[in-house]
Image: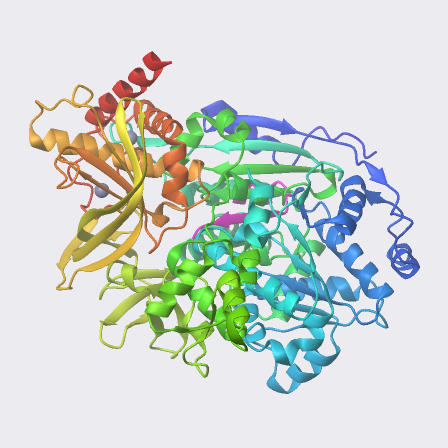
Amino acid sequence: MPPERTTEPWSALLQTGRDDGRLVHEEREGPGAARLADAPPELHREVLGALARLGIERLYSHQAQAVRAAWTSATIVTTGTASGKSLCFNLPTLDVLCRDPRARAMYVYPTKALAQDQARALAQFGLAKRVRPAIYDGDTPREARAQIRRTANVVLTNPDMLHLGILPNHAAWSELFANLAVVVLDEAHCYRGVFGSHMANVLRRLRRIAAAYGTTPRFLLTSATIANPLELAERLTGLEHVQLIDDDGSPAPRRRIAVWNPPLTDELQARRRSPLGEAAQLLAQLLRDGARAICFIKSRKAVELLSRLVREDLSATDAELAQRIAPYRAGYTPQQRRELEQRLVRGELRAVITTDALELGIDIGQLDAALVVTFPGTVSSLRQMWGRAGRRGRGLALYLAGEDALDQFFCRHPEDFLSRPVEAAILDHESPLIFRSHLLCAAHEGPLSAADAEYFGPRWEAAAEQLHSAGELRRRPAYSSGGRDGEEAAARAGAGYVPRRPGAYPAAEVSLRSASADTFAIVDVTSGELLGSTEAARAHSTVHEGAVYMHLGSSYEVRELDLRRRRALVAPFSGDTYTQPKRLTDTEITRLLDRRQALGATLSFGEVTVTDTVLGYQRKRFADHEHVELVALDLPPTAFATQALWFEPDADQLDCELPLEALLGALHATEHAQIAVLPLIAMCDRWDIGGLSTNLHAQTGGPSIFIYDAHPGGIGIARCAFARFEELCEDAARLIGECPCADGCPSCVQSPKCGNLNEPLSKSGARLLLERMLRTGAAAL
Ligand SMILES: [Zn+2]
Ligand SMILES: [Zn+2]
């Protein structure tokens, strides 16, 4: 045991925060002793030999459990950051490959960087005769591809390549599919929302193709800690009876958890010092006191600003130290990444500053301190970033709050946030547009038939019928060869479906990041590079002319939105402003799916059509959110179908005597508060949710608030909010009731994405409405 140090590199910093009240919460975690277990002796002797060569004498208990679980069924492992999750799927995979020279495995990674790290890790086992890993992604040279298909027995790829390159060309991969023993999905919590809903369908297609070649691969998943790991694994794969391994046997470092709120600069408006300035000061002090640190912050612009501020702060006292921090950017080559990571591990670099989007790509083990600047959206990802703290068994995990509603809510209830179960990862593989688009891809991969209920569920045929009506599929009698018996068999088995245009390539039309195939391309005019795409339904509000558009943490300005050619032309943007669209939204209820009384209000769930007209946009300054200009736009309305909940408060909960402006303000502020806290229940971003409040809705005939999935077809967020509406109202009431501002601020009822530019809002009206609803609920108990 190392001697107990009396001071850590963060002791002085924390003391300052205690003295002036910026440190609003502290917790201690660990240390926890490692629980070890022998590697299962049934493992192939070459795998055991490889472990010995690597110096791994014993496993952590969860690793041994995971290996045994993997031998019997699909398994998901959800232990902490740096707990050795890779061994959990590598050992059973290597075991299979050593036993059966023909067996193949497929590893699916959400990012290329992670696939590269894993290929390296596999090579370290030194089993080159038995294990031949190869990365197969967009960067794989054409001439190497055929060779990989023939000889690699571990193919490391990503969801897009699987969907677009491998499944549609399964015949070229017949060796792989005919011997596919294991499919590994690492970082499975990334597959949620739209991306997850797609991925669930891609994996169903994968199982279906494997079955056509006679294999049923074993699925092995890992995930960060989430509220519903088994549900996620089952929804993603479509399998039942997945085993969960979550009892972490790795040693927990002695970790100090700190929640830090920048000081108030304006009491009345509850304005605080900018988290950037605050973070720079904290980081500089930690570095001076000898810590090695990683700092996570939302955008690339913020990464650059923060790096500059820390350097300036340090260069006054220690010019040499000022040179030992670096931003960690997207777009590094693997070699550049490796070099940076190694300099950090060796201590030549003392700190990296990175966007939270890149957290998944960095391979540095643990450092002394992990700073997370502003709420990363979910407690689950916060914990994952904090997991980077703990080099040599001790560390500081610090969260520094911004002014957003969730940030300040967190600062008021740190115990609550840190003790409540983390968020649930939501996805809906039957989201109609996504489901249909993959069913069409599947039909191109092989005729659809009754047997497909096994993969796509009982609703596959209704969706296939819709594709038939749309002219994409044609019916084919299942057994057309002969007479009455054949017809009866066909009737029993149901009709089969084949593509109407066999030469088409529908997978190319489906982007795994968009809920709808109807998308706009986003093109960087300076480089000609295709940055990505956005759903057509969202294009007007996100990439209108003049919009500042964020992509992987970088800012771009939209030069032109070309409605005819369905693309947005953008250029890198270095200005200090951002934009917020002003729009007119309407909802039409098309189908009621569920209804109940909740907290005295009539609460409904169903399908709606959302019509949006973007009228213009407001430009604001990045640093202080000051209004710069309002620009009018002339864009036609867009509409999309999605899922929504809506509720109609009871007349005596709402002061209907109120002047119209006050009534609207109360409804509008309630809607904003509910949307702000919804990510605490469903693992989503507030940008995945839309809302509408009105004093008179044409169909409900009264005051109503709608909360809808902002993606065409819906991905399960509104459904989750419908089920947990009471919690949603409780959290919203606390968010508003506890904010110290006088009449509404960005930390409670103002929303950065409001289409009405936060007009009108009544904090007091919303507070009253929510409190009355909660009282009704309490009285009913
Ligand atoms: Zn407030
Ligand atoms: Zn609004």
Q: On the rendered image, what quadrant is the N terminus found in?
A: top right
Q: Is residue 224 left or right of residue 716?
A: right
Q: Is residue 146 left or right of residue 656?
A: right
Is 288 inside the magenta-drawn segment? yes
Image quarter for ligand 1 = top left
For the residue pair 194 and 661, the one nearer the viewer reads as 194
| Total numbered labels | 0
From what the image shows, is residue 770 above or below residue 190?
above
Q: Which residues are magenta?
A: 283-298
- Residue 640 lies, in percent from the top left, at 26, 57
Which residue is located at x 62 percent, y 40 percent? 289
- Residue 370 lies, in percent from the top left, at 58, 43
In this view, which residue lies farthest toward the bottom?
Answer: 143
- Residue 390 lies, in percent from the top left, at 68, 41
Asked if residue 226 shows in the view, the reply is yes
Asked if residue 352 shows in the view, the reply is no
Which residue is located at x 23 percent, y 36 percent? 705
Is 85 inside the magenta-drawn segment? no
Q: Is residue 121 left or right of residue 773?
A: right
From what the image shows, is residue 412 above or below residue 360?
above
- Residue 607 lies, in percent from the top left, at 29, 47
Which residue is located at x 53 percent, y 62 percent? 493
